[in-house]
């Protein structure tokens, strides 16, 4: 056995013509490294087989007939045929971040557990919770026969109206990067691949195929790209999805700077790059620009393909070197081998839906954010005898986000979508998990009545008679469009009517991102539940009753009004489909709380904000330099009467200023504490968060001098601060040792 192994490796590495070629299946030898196996596999493949591996077909049965394959999984996003001759696996690709999704609305949908939306997971500020949620997604992907999950969205919430903000990890590169990285780790713990997306600067959906995002390279490296870089380092996703938009004049999927220079060059990325579905544009430019796999071929009415058939000709006449194709195939093969997807083939199997629903519920409970709790109106247990509940279909279910990420939870939708016939990104889906039923179960002695609130006067009258009124408001957001920050269907007037009638009004939001709340000052309680997944109704109810002590914190800022942001409306709104347009990110890296802070604009609710039913004291902040690193430590004590979890947030800033905002999140730590308990948290601050990108020296530069380190509860909390003096430091673009002084 061993001798055979040695011979194969030797043959593979020597490639000597004098020796016999390795057996076609030599690559299957598990004793070899993934690199060795990938090399042997590439060597054994014909050119046609290589082109098969880099060509992703639309997986669904709705693909154009020429591209439909019996072996593809029904209603799935993608399918790449395997190479049976060599025993190489097909690639079965499924969306997305909340679980195994279904392409298109046509029944029967795959019914799978919906985990909470990405923004809710980020709200946990708890990487372990994200990994646990990801592990459930990955387990269902595997048990559904998928070995690639198109998940791990980390575009920054730069435009609060972006219809896909619900899929992402918020506005801060460190929080988004660490949380999404942790989520990816969970998915890949099932020996499958994830595809982090959408790389890069895909921060609005309006005109997403035509918008040309103009961004300063240093600003990009300190914002959106840093989020990707951190998530990739932490989660090691085996694949990256390049996005639909252009960046600085070049399509993202043929963008030499993004793909070849930054991702594969500076960051040393070893995985492969697949296009977003149909984001490939040109046979040669894409091949040379860093794309490794075209996808979505045969999607809708277009075939989209730029490589199938065409790449062969480009190789034959030398426009694309053979080695370029080999590198693509090697990356894909290596990813499938190293992830375990080859050696542990996926196959449809049973799913423990009950256990996964509970896991989804726990994930939601860890991230629901208590935004306001005036006079301790919450929790409800033991207080209110009569509760009037209004709106949001809270009697039957909870909302989910739309588009390719749409998961269909077991049991179907609780509220049929009257506009389902409009097609993608419809239908709007509500999961059958009723907050009202959850409240009734948790508060057996209370009289709880629901009405949809459509009749505002009747709602006010009903609210007046109750001890407490709870209004559920929803905003459906979805891929392929952006949304105003105002709640739809005049729900603001429902809140206003109820709040005017009952001083004890609580609002529960189910939204994909920030909305405006003109009534915020008039209600006592506000809870942001995002899109909370399969068991979201139970999770919301348990937070409201107090069975769960909320510990979520905002991963985004909620602005007072759209004008508080660099773009009050998405660029290109109203332009005809197909017309290209630029959006210049004049704010650079000044995203979210950095922008608001720089402009002295108070948010409605700040990044990092989140309340609890207990109280905490955060003390003992110290900051010192250990080696070259900034080491911070502090204590969190639960000073209240119930157990709860608190996040210590560390913000950093140079004392003289000069960054893209007054401060950056430098680190965070969440502590789960029994009443009276205390924990010490110690963090090492990632030096890139103390640095600026120097394009000339192509590295990160920490300026010598004094830095303020603040321990706070949000981006606007003064908290407590210490100063520390840091030495000058240079760091390379990617992982690795500090740059020598030049
Ligand atoms: C989306 C991707 C998704 C792909 C496959 C695209 O429209 O932008 O996020 O993975 O479709 O469904």
Image (cartoon, grey):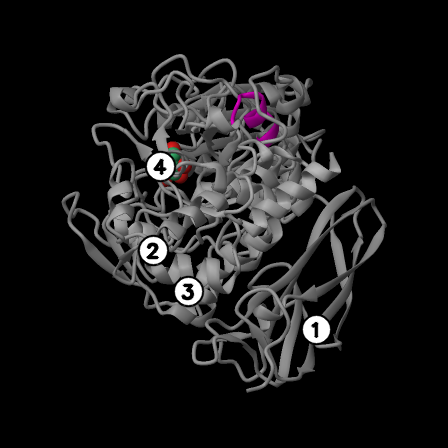
Against 561, residue 693 (above or below) is below
Image quadrant occupied by the C terminus: bottom right
In front: 657, or 544?
657
Q: Nearer the viewer, mark 3 or mark 4?
A: 4
Closest to the camera, between mark 3 and mark 2, is 2
Residue 365, quarter of picture: top right
Of callouts 1 and 4, the N-terminal one: 4
Query: Which of pointers 1 and 4 indicates the residue nearer the eye?
Result: 4
Q: Is mark 4 within 8 Å of ligand 1?
A: yes
Q: Determine the main secondary structure of the stretch shown in magenta.
A: helix
**x, y percentage for residue 252?**
33, 53
Magenta part of the chain: 138-146
Mark 1 packing: few (<14 Cα in 10 Å), some, or many (20+)? some
Residue 143 inside the magenta-drawn segment: yes
Q: How crowded is mark 3: few (under 14 residues within 10 Å), some or many (20 or more)?
A: some
Task: Give the CA separation, mark 4 to mark 2.
Answer: 16 Å
| Lower sequence index among marks 1 and 3 | 3
Decide if ligand 1 comes within 8 Å of the CB at mark 2: no
From this view, report whether residue 566 is shown above or below residue 523: below
What is the spatial separation of the Cα atoms under label 3 and label 2, in whole angstroms? 19 Å
Q: Are circles 3 and 4 on residues that touch, CB within 8 Å?
A: no
Dot label at residue 295: 4
Quadrant location, the N terminus: top right
Tag 2 residue: 289
Quickly name the residue at label 1. Answer: 629
């Amino acid at each position: 056995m061993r001798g055979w192994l040695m011979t194969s490796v030797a043959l593979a590495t020597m490639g000597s013509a004098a020796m016999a070629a390795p057996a076609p299946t030599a690559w299957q030898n598990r004793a070899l490294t993934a690199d060795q196996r990938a090399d042997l596999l590439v060597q054994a493949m014909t050119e046609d087989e290589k082109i098969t591996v880099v060509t992703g077909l639309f997986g669904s049965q709705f693909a154009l007939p020429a591209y439909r394959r019996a072996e593809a999984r029904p209603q799935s996003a993608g399918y790449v045929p395997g190479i049976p001759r060599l025993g190489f696996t097909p690639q079965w690709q499924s969306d997305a971040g909340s679980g195994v999704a279904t392409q298109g609305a046509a029944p029967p949908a795959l019914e799978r557990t919906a985990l909470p939306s990405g923004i809710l997971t980020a709200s946990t500020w708890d990487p372990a919770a994200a990994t646990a949620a990801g592990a459930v997604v990955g387990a269902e992907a595997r048990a559904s026969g998928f070995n690639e999950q198109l998940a791990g969205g980390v575009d920054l919430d730069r435009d609060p109206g972006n219809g896909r903000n619900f899929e992402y990890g918020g506005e801060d590169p460190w929080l988004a990067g660490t949380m999404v990285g942790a989520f990816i780790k969970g998915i890949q713990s099932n020996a499958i691949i994830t595809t982090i997306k959408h790389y890069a600067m895909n921060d609005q959906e309006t005109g997403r195929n035509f918008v040309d995002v103009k961004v300063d390279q240093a600003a990009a490296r300190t914002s959106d790209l840093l989020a990707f870089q951190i998530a990739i380092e932490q989660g090691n996703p085996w694949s990256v999805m390049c996005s639909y938009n252009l960046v600085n004049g070049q399509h993202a999927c043929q963008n030499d700077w993004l793909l070849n220079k930054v991702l594969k060059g500076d960051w040393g990325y070893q995985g492969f790059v697949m296009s977003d579905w149909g984001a490939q544009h040109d046979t040669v430019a894409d091949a040379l620009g860093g794309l490794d796999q075209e996808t979505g071929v045969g999607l809708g009415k277009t075939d989209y393909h730029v490589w199938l058939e065409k790449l062969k000709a480009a190789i034959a006449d030398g426009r694309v070197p053979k080695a370029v194709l080999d590198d693509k195939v090697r990356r894909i093969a290596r990813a499938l081998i190293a992830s375990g997807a080859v050696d542990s083939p996926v196959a449809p199997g049973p799913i423990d839906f009950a256990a996964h629903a509970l896991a989804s519920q726990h994930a939601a409970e860890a991230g629901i954010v208590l935004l306001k709790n005036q006079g301790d109106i919450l929790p409800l247990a033991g207080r209110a005898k009569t509760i009037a509940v209004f709106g949001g279909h809270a009697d039957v279910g909870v909302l989910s986000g739309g588009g390719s990420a749409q998961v269909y939870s077991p049991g179907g939708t609780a509220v049929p979508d009257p506009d389902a016939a409009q097609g993608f990104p419809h239908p709007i889906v509500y999961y059958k998990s009723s907050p009202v039923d959850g409240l009734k179960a948790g508060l057996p002695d209370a009289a709880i009545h629901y009405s949809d609130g459509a009749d505002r006067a009747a709602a006010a009258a009903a609210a007046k008679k109750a001890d407490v009124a709870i209004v559920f408001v929803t905003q459906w957001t979805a891929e392929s469009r952006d949304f105003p920050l105002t709640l739809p269907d005049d729900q603001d007037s429902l809140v206003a009517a109820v709040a005017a009638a009952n001083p004890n009004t609580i609002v529960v939001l189910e939204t994909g991102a920030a909305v405006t709340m003109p009534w915020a000052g008039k209600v006592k309680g506000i809870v942001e539940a995002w899109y909370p997944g399969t068991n979201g109704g139970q999770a919301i109810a348990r937070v409201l009753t107090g069975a769960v002590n909320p510990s979520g914190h905002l991963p985004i800022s909620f602005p007072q009004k759209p004008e508080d942001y660099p773009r009050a409306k998405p660029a290109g709104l109203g332009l005809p489909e197909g017309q290209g347009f630029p959006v210049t990110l004049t704010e650079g890296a000044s995203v979210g709380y950095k922008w608001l802070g720089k402009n002295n604009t108070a948010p409605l609710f700040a990044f990092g904000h989140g309340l609890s039913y207990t109280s905490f004291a955060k003390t003992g902040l110290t900051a010192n330099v250990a080696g070259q690193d900034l080491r911070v430590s502090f204590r969190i004590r639960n000073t209240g009467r119930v157990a709860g979890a608190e996040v210590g947030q560390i913000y950093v800033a140079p004392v003289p200023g000069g960054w893209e905002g007054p401060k950056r999140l430098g680190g965070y730590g969440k502590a789960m504490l029994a009443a009276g308990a205390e924990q010490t948290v110690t963090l090492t601050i990632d030096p890139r968060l103390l640095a600026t990108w120097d394009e000339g020296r192509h590295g990160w530069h920490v300026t010598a001098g004094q830095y303020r380190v603040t321990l706070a509860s949000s981006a606007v909390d003064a908290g407590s601060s210490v100063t520390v003096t840091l030495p000058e430091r240079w760091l390379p673009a990617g992982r690795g040792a500090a740059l020598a002084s030049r």
